[in-house]
Image (cartoon, helix red, strand yellow):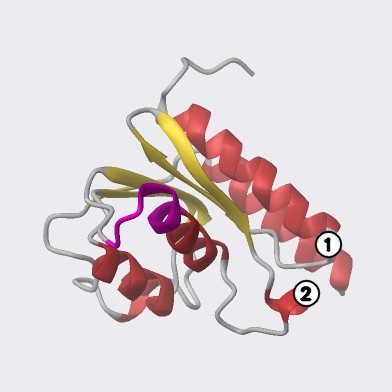
Amino acid sequence: MSYKIYSDEYFMNEALKEAMKAREEHEIPVGAVIVADRRIIARAHNQTEILHDVTAHAEMLAITAAANSLGAKYLNQCTLFVTLEPCTMCASASAWAQLGRVVYGAKDPKAGYGRIIQDILHPKTKTKSGVLEKECSGLLSDFFRDRR
């Protein structure tokens, strides 16, 4: 597939690459990238098993890496691209970081923030869902099917 450079699809594809790394490490395949000025400043994937840390979600790791990259705790000029709808913990971290945008692929009907608290993100954060949804949800479905 070819995507226009710097499109939401392009960056979600980069997040999918991170999700595939997680799968290779036997982690739930969720990947994230954070973009500032059309440049990826942070990449991460789930590492809860490897790090023995329930908070080591892709989004949390990416937010920390982006803040370190910029030398700032607020990421209001940044966009988080993540393959799965953020959970409440990750959505809260996004709010505290004041992310400018959150773009995700697959919905998470069991643990996604939208199911629990609609207004958890920062009031100025824009959201977009369903970007490469088929690819994102397919990776997760395949992972859980293979585990059964």
Front residue of this view, candidates 39 and 106: 39
Q: Which callout, 1 or 2, points to the residue nearer the camera? A: 2
Find numbered disc 1 in the image and state the secondary structure of the residue it sits on: loop
Residue 107 lies left or right of residue 139; in this view the side is left
Q: Looking at the image, tell me whether mark 1 or mark 2 is earlier in sequence order.
A: 1
In the image, residue 143 lies in the stretch drawn in magenta: no
Q: Which mark is residue 50?
A: 2
Front residue of this view, candidates 63 and 114: 63
x%, y% of residue 137? 61, 52
Front residue of this view, candidates 2 and 41: 41
Image point (87%, 64%), residue name: 146
Circle 2: residue type: Ile
x%, y% of residue 15? 57, 44
Q: Quadrant of residue 97?
A: bottom left
Depicted 123 relative to depicted 3: above or below: below
Circle 2 Cα neighbour tier, 10 Å, few/some/many (<14 / 14–19 / ≥20)? few
Residue 55 lies left or right of residue 73; in this view the side is right
Circle 1 Cα neighbour tier, 10 Å, few/some/many (<14 / 14–19 / ≥20)? some
- Name the quadrant of the N terminus: top right
x%, y% of residue 14? 59, 37
x%, y% of residue 22? 74, 58
Image point (63%, 43%), residue name: 16
Q: Which mark is residue 25?
A: 1
The magenta segment is: 66-73
Find numbered disc 2 in the image and state the secondary structure of the residue it sits on: helix
Quick check: marks 1 and 2 in contact, CB under 8 Å?
Answer: yes
